[in-house]
């Protein structure tokens, strides 16, 4: 049973993310302001994380210098506040299915940013290097397919829409108008780029401030303040700030507690048990779950272009992950061979002494 736990955790993580895509879209369809939503979501996450950080890392917390604080502030502004607000704008323009599809670009975008920042290298003389390059090309092809090709629309599984009206969830005449859809795709990719940059830069910040739980809590707290400022600027109507007993409140609580709290812990646990590649390989599951549930519960129309684009994105994801795993295995083999040759050299050097 212990061997199955990482698989169950990975599946649960993708179900949680699928729930985030669907509930967020349903909340916006219900009229909730996206900037106010991000503030409430981050505030809920902060309330959830502060007691945990105080209990588990209060005594082991490293000193927080002003320089490190500025780095964390910039990291939360870039990777959380701007990323989430831009993501929600894109979600209003597009669909939950597209949000789940473009999530597969994250490992590819992160790899591409790491190459630009010279934290990762690509060797075009090796098979793994060429496969990783192919993955980036497939990812770009998938994004272009999602943006510029619709094709025939697949029929929804049911006409009973539990989380929204059909004309809000997938109407071709309104939400999925061509220009709006293209704009939404590129805004969503911009959000994923900020997310990828956050992942890359977070590794550098962790070297200065290694307490993971406290770092996450600080980022959520700072993001709450930043999101509040943005919400005040763009949403001055006080009526938009009122929470009601509706899908908007459910989405806020779900994203704050389940996504930021539960899924972040499960992701850390999965990475520790099986590594980041294992977790990334499960990402396409959220696309399948979201596509099925958004059609079932929201009556969201899925086009052939979305399916084909999703296939390209998943193919690009697996190509990059395969190339990366080949490089890691090659380094391990090279290190083992180097260690064996060193031991042989030592033995040869000791032979004259033993014979004497």
Image (cartoon, helix red, strand yellow):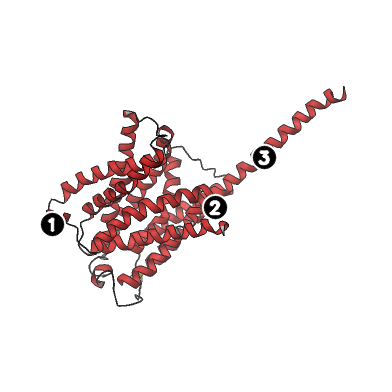
Residue 325 in view in this figure:
yes
Q: Which residue is mark 3?
A: 336
Residue closer to the observer: 81 or 48: 48
Tell me if mark 3 has few (under 14), some (14-19) or many (20+) residues whose alpha carbon lies within 10 angstroms of its own.
few
Residue displayed at 41% across by 59% down: 142
- In this rendered view, identify the residue nearer to me: 151 or 217: 217
The relative height of residue 192 versus residue 345 in the rendered view (above or below) is: below
For the C terminus, the image quarter is top right
**Which residue does the image show at 46% across and 60% down from the upper left?**
11
Question: Closer to the camera: disc 2 or disc 3?
Answer: 3
Q: Nearer the viewer, residue 78 or 268?
A: 268
Give the Cα distance between marks 2 and 3: 21 Å
Label 1 residue SS = helix
| Disc 1/disc 2 C-alpha distance (Å) | 50 Å
- The N terminus is located in which quarter? bottom right
Residue 70, by quadrant, is top left
Residue pictured at 28% horizontal, 52% vertical? 41
**Cβ atoms under marks 1 and 3 closer than 8 Å:** no
Q: How many marks?
A: 3
Q: Which residue is mark 1?
A: 239
Q: Position of residue 333 (x, y in %)?
A: 65, 43
Residue 215 visible in this rendered orientation of the protein: no
| Gap in angstroms between the C-alphas marked 1 and 3 | 65 Å
Residue assigned mark 2: 322
Residue 138 in the image, given as x and y percentages of width and height: 45, 56
> Which is nearer the N-term, disc 2 or disc 3?
2
Instruction: Give percent across and percent down for residue 186.
Output: 31, 54
**Circle nearer the viewer, 1 or 3:** 1
Of the numbered discs 1 and 3, the one sitting upstream in the chain is 1
Q: Foreground mark, 1 or 2?
A: 1
Indicate the secondary structure of the residue bearing disc 3: helix
Which residue occupies the foreground of this view, 85 or 52?
Answer: 52
């Amino acid at each position: 049973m212990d061997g199955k736990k990482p698989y169950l955790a990975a599946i649960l993580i993708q179900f949680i993310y699928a729930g985030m895509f669907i509930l967020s879209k349903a909340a916006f369809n219900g009229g909730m302001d996206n900037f106010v939503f991000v503030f409430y979501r981050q505030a809920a996450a902060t309330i959830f994380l502060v007691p945990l950080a105080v209990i588990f890392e209060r005594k082991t917390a490293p000193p927080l210098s002003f320089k490190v604080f500025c780095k964390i502030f910039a990291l939360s502004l870039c990777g959380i506040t701007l990323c989430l607000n831009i993501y929600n704008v894109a979600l209003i323009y597009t669909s939950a299915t597209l949000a789940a599809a473009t999530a597969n670009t994250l490992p590819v975008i992160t790899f591409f940013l790491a190459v630009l920042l010279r934290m990762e290298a690509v060797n075009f003389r090796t098979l793994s290097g060429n496969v990783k390059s192919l993955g980036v090309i497939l990812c770009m092809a998938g994004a272009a397919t999602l943006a510029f090709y619709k094709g025939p629309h697949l029929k929804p599984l049911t006409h009973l829409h539990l989380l929204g009206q059909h004309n809000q969830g997938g109407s071709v005449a309104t939400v999925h108008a061509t220009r709006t859809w293209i704009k939404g795709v590129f805004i969503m990719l911009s959000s994923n780029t900020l997310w990828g940059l956050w992942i890359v830069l977070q590794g550098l910040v962790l070297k200065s401030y290694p307490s993971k739980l406290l770092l996450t809590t600080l980022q959520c707290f700072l993001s709450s303040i930043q999101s509040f400022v943005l919400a005040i600027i763009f949403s001055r109507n006080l009526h938009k700030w009122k929470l009601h007993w509706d899908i908007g409140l459910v989405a806020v609580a779900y994203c704050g507690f389940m996504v930021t709290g539960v899924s972040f812990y499960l992701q850390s646990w999965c990475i520790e048990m099986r590594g980041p590649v294992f977790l990334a390989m499960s990402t396409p599951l959220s696309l399948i779950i979201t596509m099925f549930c958004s059609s079932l519960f929201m009556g969201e129309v899925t086009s052939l272009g979305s399916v084909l684009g999703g296939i390209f994105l998943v193919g690009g994801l697996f190509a990059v992950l395969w190339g990366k795993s080949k490089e890691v295995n090659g380094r391990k083999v090279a290190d083992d061979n180097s260690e064996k040759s060193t031991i042989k050299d030592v033995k040869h050097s000791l032979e004259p002494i033993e014979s004497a």
